[in-house]
Every structure is written in structure tokens, then in C-alpha cells.
Amino acid sequence: MIVSLAMSLVLSAPETILPGVLDLPVIEGSRPSVECLGLRERLAEAGSPYACLETSYDAANDIAFAYERSARQAGWVSDGGAANALWLRRTAADGKCPQLTLAAFPGPEGGAQPRAADIIFAMDPDVRCPQPTATP
């Protein structure tokens, strides 16, 4: 039952990440993640839009940066990052600056399948825009 549900999710894979919110095309070499590192419940509890894709471990870095480029082409602005995460933001019509966190995590080692990696897209729609800094 779980396997058939997981397969139906993969077979009905969306062509767009977070339609109506982020609207980025799914890049070749990535697909919806069934497992999402076991984070689906925690992400859903946060109440903000999210998506989780899977790719090969070896391609994860290149694909994550390809998604960042795609987001910047769609009007998002780089807003920092950390070891495995990139932050992007854009100004919305309501004066808020939604933030997108794009994070890549290696999947578990072992098993019959080649090692995979998950790329998580998490939106925070209620971030206040940074105040302009005064120049002397």
C-alpha cells in the first residue's frame, strides 16, 4: 500500500515546484522525494509552503545551484547562505519580503539504491523587508 502510494506520487510528479507560490520548473535529474528525510510532518507543522525533491548524491550540489539560478531569473534575490542552505527573498506587492530557503541534505548511506540527496524548498511568506541602510 505504501509503495503504491509512493509510486503514484512519483508518477504524478509536478512539472512546477510549489505552483502558485514559487513556480519554478522541476530541473532534469530531480524528482519529488517520497521520504523527504522524514521531515514532511515537521515541515507541514510549520504551516508554510514547502517542497522536497530528490536527486543523486553526486549531482545534488549542481542541481541545487541550478535551482538558485532559476529562482534568481524569476526575480528572487540572494540573501545569504550556510553550509548546505541558500536563502533568497523578493519583495511582494504587500510590502513583505517572502524568504525561500533552499537546502540540500545527503540521504542515508547503504541499501540497494545508489545514495541520494534531498533538496528542500521552504517558504516563509511573512518576512519583513530589510530596512534600507543609511549612507553617511
Image: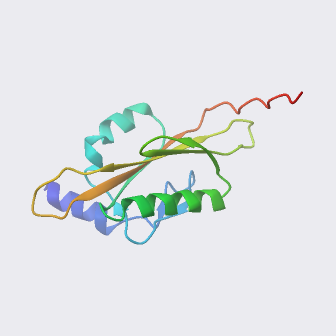
Q: Residue at x 26, y 59 (%)?
A: 116
Left or right: residue 80 versus residue 95 is: left
Left or right: residue 56 versus residue 125 is: left
Q: Nearer the viewer, residue 81 or 26?
A: 81
Q: Is residue 125 above or below residue 59?
A: above
* Rendering coords of residue 55 (x, y %): 33, 62
Q: Nearer the viewer, residue 108 or 23?
A: 108
* Rendering coords of residue 113 (x, y %): 15, 64
Q: Is residue 123 above or below residue 114?
A: above
Left or right: residue 56 versus residue 80 is: left
**Image quarter (top left, top right, bottom left or bottom right) of the N terminus:** bottom left
* Rendering coords of residue 131 (x, y %): 76, 29
Query: Going by the picture, which residue comes out furthest to the bottom?
Result: 28
**Image quarter (top left, top right, bottom left or bottom right) of the C terminus:** top right
Query: Going by the picture, which residue comes out furthest to the front?
Result: 136
Q: Residue at x 48, y 38 (%)?
A: 48
Query: Going by the picture, which residue comes out furthest to the right?
Result: 136
* Rendering coords of residue 100 (x, y %): 54, 44
